[in-house]
Amino acid sequence: MDSFFRRNLINCLSGYKSLNLIATKNKKGVTNVAPFSQVFHIGAAPPLVGILFRPHTVKRDTLENILDTNFFTLNHVTPSFYQEAHWTAANWEGSEFEGTGLEEEKKGDFFAPFVKGSPLQLGCSLVETQTLQVNQTVLVIGSIDHIYIEEKGLRKDGSLDLNALETVTVSGLDEYHIGEKLGRLAFPKPGVNPTEL
Amino acid sequence: MDSFFRRNLINCLSGYKSLNLIATKNKKGVTNVAPFSQVFHIGAAPPLVGILFRPHTVKRDTLENILDTNFFTLNHVTPSFYQEAHWTAANWEGSEFEGTGLEEEKKGDFFAPFVKGSPLQLGCSLVETQTLQVNQTVLVIGSIDHIYIEEKGLRKDGSLDLNALETVTVSGLDEYHIGEKLGRLAFPKPGVNPTEL
């Protein structure tokens, strides 16, 4: 396999991935925003999120800003701005907000900016980092301190309707999708056929 | 927030997640299969995959089998068996394959079984594990040793058409979706509007 074919293939193997714009601000006040597909759930109590950073293949600004300032935001992407979200990965001079036309949203005195128009925004702070020996990938663990969700997406039981929020998902390095619900299934029990919730 | 509401909410926050059935076999020859949404890309050369195990909320059999035998398989899920995939998470006595009707597929002399009918199957071996101090989550890193993909989903450039493979994605703990493509975008450059690939 040549390296281009290999990179495309290996990045697709896990399946659909979450897509979040991570927004930060450095100590000089310059904001940054970049797309990440390696954000995942670490724990619910306390609410923790994990992010994998591969220093050689993604821009380092986000990681450096988090390590320097402790704060970052996660922002879901919708079809109305997924192209701008992709565009933030270009090698901009200055803030990607200015370059792409995405708008910063300031909330209270939270240090990092949010992405205006995102239907799900999380204000997070750094808890710990670990470097994986196997290939120097950096795992950042953050605490979820503030949650903002458009009302149409929040159900009474706490679950989210990602179809209603129009959350975008990514496959591989560059392909974007929305979700179409198959079903929501009740807690599984042995010997009892799965049923719709 | 009560703990039920909180658990539903926090598990949804990252967005759509990959869905894979992990199949293993213990030293006595008893097979196991269980759904996981915390599988992600660690590196392309060598090809590495990471899996997060939270010992208190998911069954431990999969983790124990991987640690004992070194081998596991990852298998994408399609709409035709997503209910059985969900069902494997029930507290079965004996193998979940027998309980749910999913079929094991043996390939060559690979120790762990694959899930028959899955359009993307990976044969993996254990590379290393790390325990996260913050909440004892276990990160397993595996090497991708064998790749089987239905031809209809593999493009010439190595990327996968997950829509064609009918790969299922999961949100929260219990909601399943297929993807609907918005677009595939060219490598982003500053000052040049994103274009379809």
Image (cartoon, coloured by chain):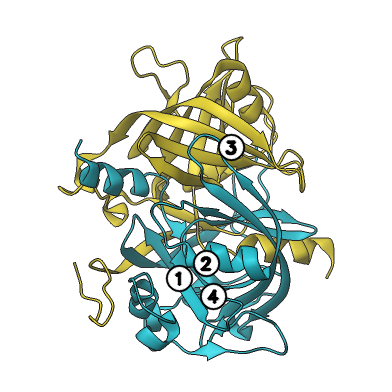
Chain colours: A cyan, B yellow
Q: Amino acid at mark 3?
A: Thr
Marked residue chain, label 3: B
Identify the mark nearer the N-term, 2 or 4. 4
Which structural element holds mark 2? Answer: helix
Give the percent coordinates (x, y) of residue A106: 62, 89
Q: Is residue B112 left or right of residue B67?
A: left
Kindly report which numbered mark, 2 or 1, lies closer to the viewer in this rendering: 2
Residue ID for mark 1: A34
For marks 3 and 4, give the one nearer the viewer.
Answer: 4
Mark 2 in CB contact with mark 1 (< 8 angstroms): yes
What chain letter is assigned to the residue under label 2?
A
Callout 3 and callout 4 share a chain: no
The residue sitting at 36% across, 85% down in the picture is A99
Q: Position of residue B116 (x, y in %)?
A: 38, 30
Residue on which disc 2 sits: A62
- The answer for how far apart the CA atoms under marks 3 and 4 are is 38 Å
Determine the residue positioned at 34% across, 39% down: B120
Q: CA distance from mark 3 to mark 2?
A: 38 Å
